[in-house]
Amino acid sequence: MVVVITGASSGVGRAAAIAFARAGARLVLAARSASSLEPVAETCRGLGAEVRVVVADVTDPAALDPVADAFGRVDVWVHTAAVMAYGRFEDVPADVFNQVVETDLIGAANVARVALRRFRAQGRGVLIYGGSLLGTVVTPYTSSYVTSKWGLRALVRALRLETRDAPDIHVCLVAPGSVDTPIYRTAANFAGRYGQPPPPIDSPEKVAAAIVRCARRPRGVVTVGLANRIIQFGFVATPPLYDLLVGPLMRRGGLSTETVAPHEGNVFRPYSQAGQTARTASASASPWRSPAPAAAGRRDGSMKFGPNASSAASSGSTSRVLPAPVDAISARIRSRLNAAIGAITTRWSAPAARSAPAPSRTPPSM
C-alpha cells in the first residue's frame, strides 16, 4: 500500500506517517521543509518502511505531481497541511488572512485535483483530509482558519457527491477537536498572546489512529474528541448561549497568558518544530517571542482584554491586559444568561438566591 502524506513534518501528519509505517505501508512524505521531513522519514525507515521525501508547497498545483508520481501509484492520500493565524479579523493583515485560506482550503483543493485524477485512472483510492471541530463551529480570533475549515468540509461533501459513480474511490474527513501539536505556537499571531489547545486535548497519535482506521474502512466523516458532539450541539441548538460563552472560554482556554509580539509565524515560510507539541514547543525557542512593539501603524494587532482595554488601545501601547478572574467572568455570564436566554433555557440564579426554592416551570416541548 502506497500512502502519501502532505503535511508530514509535524503534528498529526507526522503521527500518521509513523502509524502507517508500523502498518507496513510505503510512504511518500511531503511538506515545505526538507529539514523537517528528514527526521520523520528516518523514524519511519527505522520501523521498516520504504520512504520517499518530496518537498512541496500545496499552494503550488505543479508541485504535487512529483508527490503523486513518487511510487507510480497512490492508494491512500492523507492531507494534513495547514497554517493558522490568531487575532481579531481587522487586526490580521489581509495577506496573512488570504494565505491561510490559500494554504488550508485552496491547497486542499489542489491535492484533491491531483489525487482524484490518479484514483480515476487506477479505479480506486482513498483521500483523507485532516479537518477540525472548527469546520462545524466558530471561535473568535481564528477567522481565517475557521473560514478555511468550513470550506474544507463543504469541499469534502462536494467531492463525495461527485465520486458516487466510483464505489472504490472514497473522500473522507477526520475532524478532531483540540490536538496537542505545534500549530498553536507556529501560527501567525496578532492577538498579543500565544495560542494554545483548549481542553479537552487529544494526542496526535489518537487522531493518526483514526486516520489509519479510516484508510482501512473508509467513512465519510470521522469525529475525534469526546466533547465535540456537545460543543456542536450547543452551537446549533442554543446559539445565544454558545455565543455568550465562547468568547470568554476562548480567551481563557484558547489563548495562553504568555505574551508575544505580532508576527507572521509559519504562514509564509516553514518553521521547523518536527516532533514537538503545543506543550513542548517552548516559547524560548521561538524566533517570534519578543517584548518589542511592532512598528507604528504596521501589523500591531495586539488584543487587550479587561477593563483597561480601551485606554491601552488608544495609547498605542503593546502591553497586554489579561482576562478578568474566573469569578468575575462567571458572575457576568450568570447575569447575562437570564436576560439572553430567559425561558428558552435553564435560568441561572444569583448565588444568594440559590437556597430559595426554584419557581415551577414547564419544560419546553422537544
Image: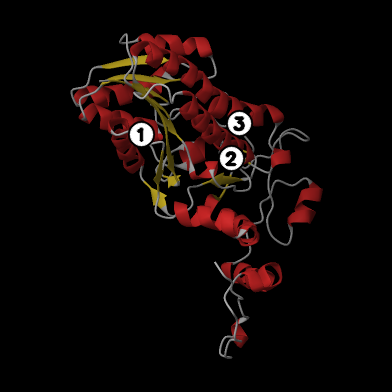
- Marks 3/2: CA–CA distance: 18 Å
Measured from the top left, where is residue 270 in percent x and y? Answer: 50, 24
Check if mark 1's residue and mark 2's residue have beta carbons within 8 Å. Answer: no
The answer to whether 63 is drawn above or below residue 245 in the figure is: above
Neighbor class of circle 2 (other Cα within 10 Å; few <14, some 14-19, many 20+) is: many
Out of 46 and 272, give the one closest to the viewer: 46
Out of 299 and 197, give the one closest to the viewer: 197
> Going 44% across and 20% down the picture, which residue do you hit?
33
Q: Amino acid at mark 3?
A: Glu
Q: Which mark is residue 322?
A: none
Judged from the image, the secondary structure of the residue bearing numbered disc 2 is: helix
The answer to whether 73 is drawn above or below residue 131 in the figure is: above
Neighbor class of circle 1 (other Cα within 10 Å; few <14, some 14-19, many 20+) is: some
Measured from the top left, where is residue 103 in percent x and y? Answer: 55, 25
Taking the view exactly as shown, the residue that stands out farthest to the front is 165
Q: Is residue 214 visible?
A: yes
> Going 35% across and 34% down the picture, which residue do you hit?
275
Mark 3 and mark 1 lie on one chain; the one further toward the N terminus is 3
Q: Is residue 151 left or right of residue 300?
A: left
Mark 1 and mark 2 lie on one chain; the one further toward the N terminus is 2
Q: Which residue is mark 2?
A: 146
Taking the view exactly as shown, the residue that stands out farthest to the right is 314
Give the quarter of the figure containing the N terminus: top left
Q: Which residue is mark 3?
A: 264
Q: Amino acid at mark 2?
A: Val
Q: Which residue is mark 1?
A: 275
Q: Amino acid at mark 1?
A: Gly
- Marks 3/1: CA–CA distance: 21 Å
Give the quarter of the figure containing the C terminus: bottom right
> Going 45% across and 47% down the picture, which residue do you hit?
178
